[in-house]
Image (cartoon, rainbow, N blue to C red):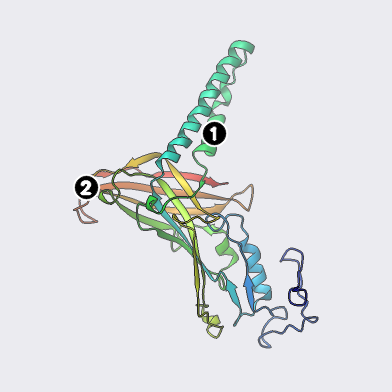
């Protein structure tokens, strides 16, 4: 019943052409490109932790080719990536248990193969261990975390304005980027009985008016909308959890600080998937002590690379 309103064009957005003449589509001014005739682009391109699947590339291509540059609107209009330390100890221990079980089975296999066939498979032990560790311990996990799993105020790790972001922005988070460094203070007395199990990452998406200079004259949204995929109510995207190999206990009366950085880059084997390099160091001080005051403990730096499968 909408054939006179909706036109379906099948094909990759990089390859299609719009029926500009047939539909009488026009640009906003003579300076615009001949294909820039679109008023609004709506796209559900977001993947886990926003960037997984790398669909943003196609959206940027469509925007640059088809959207009216001064008055066109993008929905979502803005996205923000967050991370926070979390308590998710049951799942962290479960992953460790699975890893230990896999290595136990390997040990039995090596012993039995040698005793029955006289073949020593132990030469493959290091490779097998690395493979199991990457799968069970160094792969992020999709989770539906409760709101109280967050142990500190979430930190912004990347912001994107959908009207101005570039293909370079879509490739990930790199060392030295504006939001790549983080600092968290976890106050033990606010989270009785909790343990720092790792970090969680998620994103928010906004549907609001343009904020870039070039869109100053674009139509304004009177009723903006907001989507949060963080811990709390269920969403399709959930959160990506990066468990520590060893958890960090919280001690009564003390504050644990985590200082570090996040890098998120595309996998060399599959451009739609990402790896996250997380570096951090922890320290503890009395909660009554000033932030830069006397430390009770300062741990060594930790660096792990996680796959987002």
Q: What element carries label 1?
A: helix
Does residue 182 sit above or below 218 in this rendering?
Answer: above
* Mark 2 neighbour class, 10 Å CA radius: few under 14, some 14 to 19, many 20 or more: few
Q: Where on the picture, by quarter, is residue 8?
A: bottom right
The answer to whether 278 appears left or right of 122 in the picture is left
Residue located 72% across and 66% down the image:
14
Q: Where is residue 247 in the image (x, y as percent from the top left)?
A: 37, 40
- Spatial CA distance of label 1 from label 2 is 38 Å
* Badge nearest the viewer, 1 or 2: 2
Q: Do the residues labelled 1 and 2 touch (CB within 8 Å)?
A: no
Quadrant position of residue 166: bottom right
Point out which mark residue 147 bears: none
Q: In this view, does 77 lie above or below 84?
A: below
- At horizontal 52% and vertical 78% (from top left) the residue drawn is 209
Residue 29 lies left or right of residue 290; in this view the side is: right
- Residue underneath mark 2: 253
> How far across and down, in percent of the image, does residue 100 sit?
48, 29
The percent coordinates of residue 273 (x first, y second) are 60, 51
Q: Residue furthest front?
A: 1
> Above or below — where is 195 with respect to 230?
above
Quarter occupied by residue 179: bottom left
Coordinates of residue 202 in the picture (x, y in percent): 48, 56
Mark 1 or mark 2: name the one nearer the start of the chain. Answer: 1
Q: In which quarter of the image is the N terminus?
A: bottom right
Q: Label 1: which residue? A: 132
Closest to the observer, 210 or 276: 210
Disc 2 element: loop
């Amino acid at each position: 019943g909408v054939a006179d309103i909706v036109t379906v064009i099948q094909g990759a957005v990089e390859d299609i052409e719009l029926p500009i003449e047939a539909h009488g589509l026009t640009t906003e001014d003579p300076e615009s490109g001949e294909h820039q005739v679109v008023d609004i682009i709506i796209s559900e391109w977001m993947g886990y932790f926003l960037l997984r699947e790398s669909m943003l590339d196609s959206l940027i291509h469509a925007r640059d080719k088809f959207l009216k540059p001064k008055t066109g609107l993008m929905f979502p209009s803005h996205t923000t990536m967050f991370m926070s330390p979390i308590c998710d100890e049951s799942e962290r221990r479960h992953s460790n248990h699975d890893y230990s079980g896999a290595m136990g089975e390997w040990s039995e296999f090596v012993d039995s193969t040698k005793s029955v066939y006289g073949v020593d498979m132990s030469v493959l032990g290091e490779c097998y261990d690395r493979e199991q560790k990457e799968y069970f311990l160094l792969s992020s996990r999709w989770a539906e975390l409760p709101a109280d799993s967050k142990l500190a105020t979430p930190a912004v790790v990347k912001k994107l304005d959908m009207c101005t972001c570039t293909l370079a922005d879509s490739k990930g988070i790199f060392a030295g980027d504006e939001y790549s460094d983080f600092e968290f203070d976890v106050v033990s007395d606010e989270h009785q009985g909790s343990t720092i199990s790792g970090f969680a990452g998620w994103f928010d998406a906004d549907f609001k008016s343009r904020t870039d200079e070039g869109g100053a004259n674009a139509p304004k949204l009177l009723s903006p909308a907001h989507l949060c995929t963080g811990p709390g109510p269920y969403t399709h995207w959930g959160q990506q959890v990066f468990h520590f190999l060893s958890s960090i206990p919280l001690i009564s009366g003390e504050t644990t600080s985590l200082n570090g950085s996040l890098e998120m880059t595309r996998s060399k084997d599959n451009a739609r998937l990402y790896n996250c390099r997380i570096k951090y160091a922890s320290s503890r001080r009395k909660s009554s002590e000033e932030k830069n005051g006397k430390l009770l403990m300062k741990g060594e730096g930790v660096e792990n690379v996680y796959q987002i499968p």
